[in-house]
Every structure is written in C-alpha cells, then in structure tokens.
Image (cartoon, rainbow, N blue to C red):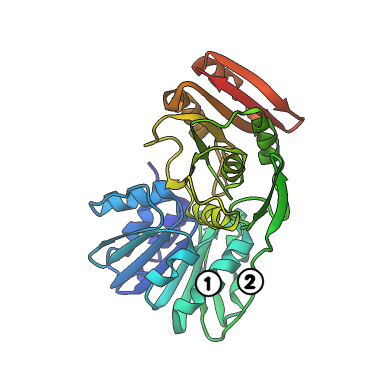
Amino acid sequence: MANSPVYELLERNIEIFENAEILIAGDIYDPMTLALVKNAKKATVIVDNYVCAGKMAAMIGQSLDNSFPQVIEHKHVKIIFSDVSSALDKIENVNRLLILLPKNKQQTVKLLNLLKSKLNDNAEVYTAGSNDGGGKSADSLLKVMGFVRKIDLARKCTLFKAIYEQDFNTYKAPAAIDVEVMGHKLSLNQDSAVFSLGKLDAGTRMLTEALEEVIPQGHALDLGCGCGVVGIALLKAGFKNVSFADVSASALALTRDNIEKNGVNEGAEIVASDMLNGHDKYSLIAVNPPFHQGISTTTAPTVNMIMSAKDHLTKDGVFYMVANSHLGYDEVLLENFSKVTIVKNSSTFIVYKASI
C-alpha cells in the first residue's frame, strides 16, 4: 500500500520529529504517521479513527479493546484513541504541535483553541494537509498566534509552521438544538466534525421516521451513531437495551454527552467499532453509513457492512439503512437478504428495510 501524500510531505521534513517532544492531532487515517516519531524524544498521538488507532497499536505490539477513550503507551510513544476534549487530561505540555488538517476548517480552529493549553511559550505549531482539503490556506488560521511561514509544498500538500507567541480565542462551540424525533423532544449537542449544524440532517430524519413502525423489543444497535440521536430516540420509544457504535471518537464523545443530556443512561452502551466487526447479534440494526473518509469518497466499507449484517441479526431481526439514492446499494442488499423493501424515499435518500 502506498504511503499517503501527507505522510510523504512530512517524511521529507523528518527533522520536525527528531528528538522532539511532539503532539500530533487532527484527521489521522494513515497509521504510518506513527513511523515519523521513531526518533522523537516523546510523542503523543491523538487518533479519532478507531481503525487507524488499532493499526498504530499493533505497530507497537499492542491492541485496542472497544472502550472509549483509551490510551496505549510504549517507550516514548503514547497513542490516545479519543476526541481532543476528552484527551486533554492525558496530555503533557509540549514544545511542538502538528495538526493533520481536518476537511472542516472549524475543526482546525477548535483543535488549535483546545490544544493551546498544552503548548509552552514559543512552541512550534505545524499544519499539514492536501491543498484541496485546506492545506494551502491554513496559514490564515495560524496567524492569530504569531509568526507563520510556509515550510514545504509537495504532492499537492502544504506544510506551514507558526510560533505560539500570543494567546487567542477564535472558537465558539455550536449551540445545542432541540428536535422532535419519533414523537419525543430531544436536546442535542453539536459538533461540525460529526453531523450537520443547526438541524437534524435529512437522511437521519428520514431514517427515524421509518423507525416509528418498529415495536421496541430486544437489543438494538445504532451503528455509525454520530450524535446518538437514533439510539436515543429508540430508548425513548421503549427499547431497554441500545448499543451506540462508531469508528469516530468525536462521535462517541458527542453521543455520550447527548445520552446524559437526554437522561437515557440506563440501557445505553457506547462502543468503538469498525462497522460490525466484533459485534454480537441484534433484533434491530439502524445505520446511516458515511461515505467519506477525510476528503475521499468511498462506498466499500458500507458494501462490506451490508454483506456481514445478516450475521449480526437475530432470527426475526431487521436491518434499516438510509443512504444517498445515487449510491445504488439495492443489488448488494438483495444478494444478502431474503427480503428487502424501500420504506421511505425522496429524490436524495432511500431508507431500506431488510430481513433474513
């Protein structure tokens, strides 16, 4: 497997990591990022993606369970599978920070504002990212802290360096929203890294409308839980046990907060997972699968998930999935389930119901 362009950009600037006390955060999908800190004095890597965190743990001879958050340490390296807010009390102050740029600029602003508390005076702050993902203009986000300059440009990626010379406060967390879902009023905290701001996204809304027909019984799974709204609504509707699963630590943190906010802690379980890997069987699986990883678009994880879903349903279990209508999951669903129906659709989304 070829190394990512951002990795190659950083590898040719390996002196950033040599004998450094460095903190790395942001959109980390390439486990080879860990190889960059081989000769660092001390390195902490905050990884939001569970799959990548697991591969990094394997690189140092360890493994992750499905809990959140969790810390893996080996020699001078600390891997933290967590959202940044939950990781702060596990991080020591550093003289160097590298942010692998999220596709959402507000997430970069959030990271800078949260992590500045871990920077010593005059710490070096680096950003690296693809030019079409914000890498070329990241200097505009760094200038609030002090001197900024471009270090390198390669493989359609850009590396900037700033010096933390002055304090700044440029991030304001989005306000909670109130929504009515499946006949229940919910209050939801938001995060631009997890779902659309200011409203419930149309796909999730359509999925919850389809789930109104479900009789609450057995154990349900909110797969790819995002902000947790689907599972919270299922608990409110009468399910006694709901598992919330996501590959993103930010999503799991937001779900945890929203479960607490809506008073449905009893019967709620939060687990980190790569789609259905490691899961048992459920009477209901509800999923609004993503088809983006960073700035890339892919349907392969969803196709693989559909192919394994029947093995994670009880005898009378049902599988509900909402998807963009143009992605064409009909064929793979029909190949893997004995009964598939479209229970809701629009010009943009389709909600499928499948059973074995």
Name the quarter where the N terminus is drawn: top left
Q: Nearer the viewer, residue 64 or 122?
A: 64
Residue extending farthest to the right is: 347
Left or right side of 95 for 195: right
Q: Residue placed at 57% from the left, 84% from the top?
A: 167
Callout 1: SS: helix
Tell me where residue 118 sits by quadrant: bottom left
- Return the disc, 1 or 2, that comes first in the chain's sequence: 1
Q: Is residue 191 visible?
A: yes
Q: Which mark is residue 150?
A: none
Q: Residue placed at 25% from the left, 52% from the top?
A: 62
Instruction: From the image, tell me which residue sits under label 1.
Output: 114
Q: Nearer the viewer, residue 108 or 239?
A: 239
Left or right side of 42 for 252: right
Q: Position of residue 212 (x, y in %)?
A: 67, 32
Q: Residue placed at 56% from the left, 34% from the top?
A: 286
Q: Position of residue 307 (x, y in %)?
A: 47, 24
Instruction: From the image, tell me which residue sits under label 2.
Output: 171
Amino acid beneath label 1: Leu
Left or right side of 83 for 106: right
Q: Nearer the viewer, residue 54 or 173?
A: 173
Q: Residues within 10 Å of mark 1 (few under 14, many from 20)?
A: some
Q: Position of residue 208 (x, y in %)?
A: 66, 37
Callout 2: SS: loop
Amino acid beneath label 2: Tyr
